[in-house]
Amino acid sequence: EPEVTQTPSHQVTQMGQEVILRCVPISNHLYFYWYRQILGQKVEFLVSFYNNEISEKSEIFDDQFSVERPDGSNFTLKIRSTKLEDSAMYFCASRGFNEQFFGPGTRLTVL
Amino acid sequence: KNQVEQSPQSLIILEGKNCTLQCNYTVSPFSNLRWYKQDTGRGPVSLTIMTFSENTKSNGRYTATLDADTKQSSLHITASQLSDSASYICVVINLFTGGFKTIFGAGTRLFVKA
């Protein structure tokens, strides 16, 4: 069964450093998403991406965040200068016509 | 405001027992409602998807109901197993021209004890 994959599973970084979280969506999907979940809180929408551009973003997705689809398979989330409050699980998701599938997540720890 | 409220916040049941989780939403326009199971530290996994016209949908021991008039949904788990211990998240999809928005509930944390 096709699945969304994410790497790394756990990323530890120092405050102020840049991180890139990687996702490989399901191959025939056209819509891609990033979400985050701070420990003990609900899942929050960050950004959606379609046709090589951002289609929607939340107020969380400020200038320190960016997304890219550098090739035909990867979908990345970059955080330019990490802050302590960026520590969270980051989930990638992709969608075909209707069904949305989530990846296993990357746990980001900012020290 | 588009919101999804779930109850209870957490629930402890004995293995083999049934339980029902509740979800109320104020999302418009409504496209569909999904229940996800999320194990600790993992991504959400879809259990059921229900559209406006569906009242009940089952997936093994999971049965979801939807009342689009009262904007309520429930997830019933039958004959619970230890592996059912997880968070169960209700997600309402707001599908509109040019957009697809997911509104997440805070989840119900279920603990199944032997």
Image (cartoon, rainbow, N blue to C red):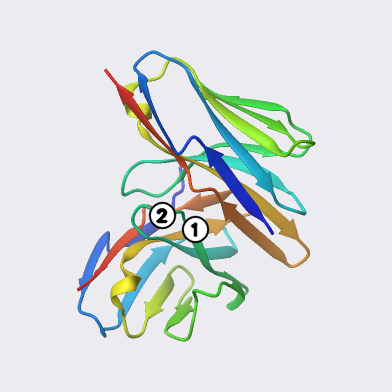
**Whole-percent x and y of residue B90?**
56, 42
- For the C terminus of chain A, give its image quadrant: bottom left
- Residue A4 is situated, as x and y percent measured from the top left of the image, at 43, 54
Image quadrant assignment for residue B13: top left
- The secondary element bearing badge 1 is classed as strand
For this view, does A102 lie left or right of residue A12? right
Badge 1 amino acid: Ala
Total number of numbered discs in the rendering: 2
Residue B48 lies in quadrant: top right
The residue wearing badge 2 is A41
The residue closer to the viewer here, B65 or A85, is A85
For marks 1 and 2 on the same chain, the one whose residue lies earlier in the sequence:
2
Q: Which residue does the image show at 26% across and 85% down from the upper left? A: A16
For label 1, the residue is A93
Instruction: Name the chain under label 1.
Output: A
Tell me what residue is drawn at x 42 percent, y 84 percent. Answer: A64
Q: Is residue B12 above or below residue A47?
A: above
> Residue at point 49% right, 48% down?
B106
**Which residue is found at the position 33% from the left and 72% from the top?**
A85
Q: Is residue B42 above or below residue A66?
A: above
Name the amino acid, label 2.
Gln
Q: Chain of mark 2?
A: A
Q: Is residue B90 left or right of residue A23?
A: right
Q: Please say whether residue A46 is visible from this viewpoint.
A: yes
Residue A68, position as x, y percentages in the image: 47, 78
- Helix, strand or loop status at disc 2: loop
State the residue in front, B2 or B57: B2
Let me know if residue A97 appears in the view.
no
